[in-house]
Image (cartoon, rainbow, N blue to C red):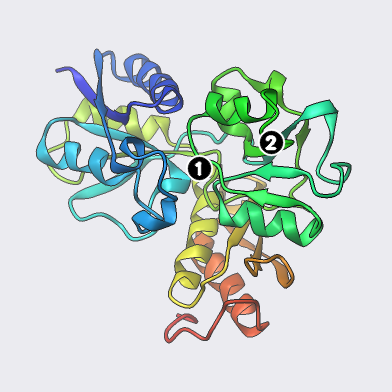
């Protein structure tokens, strides 16, 4: 058997999928073939992602390759994965997470707090834009898309004063030398699941050697952390029209493992922000996320409205 691994064709997607492929080769003893899939989000680099319907724009085509039988597993950036499960697929492995923080890449070594007034800062993320404006309402935050090199080039060629990116992507591409500042989560919370990878396979007729390898690839602490973050997001999605950030850390081990979750909801203009935290058993990570969502809903956070069943 050869394991066929479906991924987007971008350099970052191929690089992170290559890490998963190498791990699967070692764990299963089977050869792994990379199957590149082009998504709608990759094909159109000019249109804002929100115009495609937002979440899932980079995921659907890769999932379809697995469901059709053209591939055996799919690798995604977990933050791109919709919170609703996909029929016919299972989230079989979440490997150990990279550092989930956002980073600033700027000219002249500036940080978020030391950028000059009116500095032009690029990001394709409403979550990042809103949190930037919450801290620095004097900044000119502008939309930017494209691969990592394209975004970095906007700084080096002087088009922008800075861009905000995920540290995990730069780490996987060995480009951390470009980072000016790793942004403290106290200043900017990452997207739910940021820094983690998701490995999906079909929920039936999975080769036993592949299934064993996927189970070995899964990291319990990472799964607990991102499960809490994604549970928060899933609970809020029905009643939230504002950017959401979430970051969970895990302490302890075994039955005593705890998950500490912090979440924020910010108005698009950054003028209103609510931030709360909660701690609970890692085995109840879904409930931890729901509890924090209830707290945010009850707080009158911007863009939130009560959601029927949100307390379940």
Quadrant of image for the N terminus: top left
Q: Which residue is mark 1?
A: 220
Position of residue 4 in the picture relative to residue 136 (left or right): left
The image quarter containing residue 308 is bottom left
Quadrant of image for the C terminus: bottom left
Task: Examine the rendering and report whether any part of residue 261 can be seen.
Answer: no
Residue 171 spot, x, y in % from top left: 60, 24
Compared to residue 248, the image places residue 39 above or below, namely above
Residue 277: which numbered mark, if any?
none
Q: Which residue is mark 2?
A: 160
Task: Examine the rendering and report whether any part of residue 303 can be seen.
Answer: yes
- Identify the residue shown where x is 68% and y is 53%: 189
- Identify the residue shown where x is 61% and y is 71%: 292
Q: Nearer the viewer, mark 2 or mark 1?
A: 2
Compared to residue 310, the image places residue 203 above or below, namely above
Position of residue 16 in the picture relative to residue 57 (left or right): right
Q: Nearer the viewer, residue 216 or 130?
A: 130
Q: Residues within 10 Å of mark 2 (few under 14, many from 20)?
A: many
Residue 202 spot, x, y in % from top left: 19, 42
Position of residue 282 in the picture relative to residue 93 (left or right): right
The image quarter containing residue 137 is bottom right
Residue 183 spot, x, y in % from top left: 75, 42
Q: Determine whether the residue tagged by mark 2 lies in a helix, strand or loop.
A: loop
Q: CA distance from mark 2 to mark 1?
A: 40 Å
């Amino acid at each position: 058997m050869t394991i066929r691994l479906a991924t987007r064709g971008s350099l970052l997607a191929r690089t992170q999928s290559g890490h998963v492929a190498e791990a699967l080769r070692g764990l299963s003893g089977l050869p792994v073939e990379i199957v590149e899939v082009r998504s709608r989000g990759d094909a159109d680099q000019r249109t804002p992602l929100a115009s495609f319907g937002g979440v899932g724009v980079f995921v659907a085509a890769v999932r379809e390759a697995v469901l059709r039988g053209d591939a055996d597993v799919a690798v995604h950036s977990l933050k791109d994965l919709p919170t609703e499960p996909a029929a016919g697929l299972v989230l079989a492995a979440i490997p150990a997470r990279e550092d989930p923080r956002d980073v600033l890449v700027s000219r002249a070594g500036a940080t978020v707090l030391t950028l000059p007034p009116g500095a032009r800062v690029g990001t394709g993320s409403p979550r990042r834009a809103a949190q930037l404006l919450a801290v620095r309402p004097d900044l000119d935050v502008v939309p930017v898309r494209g691969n990592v090199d394209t975004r970095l080039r906007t700084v080096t060629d002087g088009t922008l004063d800075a861009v905000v990116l995920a540290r995990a992507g730069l780490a996987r591409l060995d480009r951390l030398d470009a980072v000016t500042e790793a942004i403290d989560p106290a200043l900017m919370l990452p997207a739910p699941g940021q820094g983690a990878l998701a490995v999906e396979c079909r929920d039936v007729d999975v080769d036993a050697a592949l299934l064993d390898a996927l189970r070995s690839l899964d990291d319990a602490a990472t799964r607990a952390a991102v499960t809490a973050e994604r549970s928060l997001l899933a609970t809020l999605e029905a009643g939230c029209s504002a950017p959401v950030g979430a970051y969970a850390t895990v302490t302890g081990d075994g039955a005593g493992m705890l998950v500490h979750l912090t979440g924020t909801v910010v108005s698009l203009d950054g003028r209103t922000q609510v931030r709360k935290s909660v701690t609970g058993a890692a085995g109840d990570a879904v409930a931890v996320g729901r509890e924090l969502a209830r707290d945010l809903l009850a707080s009158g956070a911007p863009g939130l409205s009560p959601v029927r069943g949100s307390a379940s």
